[in-house]
Image (cartoon, rainbow, N blue to C red):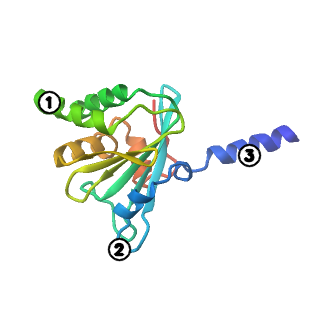
Amino acid sequence: MKTLRLLLLLGALMGMPAIAAVGLPGAVSAAIGGPDGAPRALGSGEMRWFGLKLYDAALWVPAGQPWSLEGPYALALRYARNIPGERLVDTSIDEIRRLGYTDEAVLARWREALSRALPSVSSGDTLVGVRLAGGGARFWHLDRPTADIDDAELARAFFAIWLDPRTREPALRARLLGEHASAGAGS
């Protein structure tokens, strides 16, 4: 009987949305809160790669406003593994390149900007990127700001990794946008 209760509890916990685990720093909430107050979670999901959980993700939008790729919104990632900042930057640039950005001089400049924004993370750490309305982006790690990026094209390209229809993880995109509550993500 104990085993059955434990299995039921684990099943219930596994079905809980990742939003509960991925909150926002107060400064982020203030930046994207909107006219109706605190931001609302649009959707959430987890990212797995070959069965290994990498992170939980949640997309936050201003209360009372629809989501727009041009912002404002916040993407919060709570990591399940230790990942060096250099790897986060390299993977981001590789994904941006895959989405069609091919000017290597621009990518080199973007790599430098992302190196300031994306530090090494440990299991349990949260990184938050905010897409500013019609402009750049602002990043936080463990509730502390890491970088402001004034380049609107870099901000668009960075968030496209998760939110563009051509993303490598369409099921995660659907979950973040609140389109498929039961869709999984990852390889």
**Other residues around mark 3 within 10 Å, as few (<14) / some (14–19) / many (≥20):** few
Residue 106 screen position, x and y as percent: 13, 33
The quarter of the rendered structure image containing the N terminus is: top right
The one of 139 and 21 positioned closer to us in this rendering:
139
Residue 162, by quadrant, is top left
Circles 3 and 1 in contact, beta carbons < 8 Å = no
Label 2 residue SS: loop
Q: What is the C-alpha distance between the residues marked 3 and 1? A: 48 Å
The mark closer to the camera, 2 or 3, is 2
**Other residues around mark 1 within 10 Å, as few (<14) / some (14–19) / many (≥20):** few
User: Vertically, is 121 above or below 139?
Assistant: above
The residue positioned farthest toward the right in the image shown = 1
Residue 165 appears in the rendering: no
Q: Going from the N terminus, do you reach mark 2 or mark 3 first?
A: 3
Q: In this image, 167 relative to 10: left or right?
A: left
User: Vertically, is 140 above or below 54?
Assistant: below
Residue 127 screen position, x and y as percent: 42, 43
Residue indicated by mark 2: 35
Residue indicated by mark 3: 9
Identity, as a three-letter code, of the amino acid under mark 2: Pro
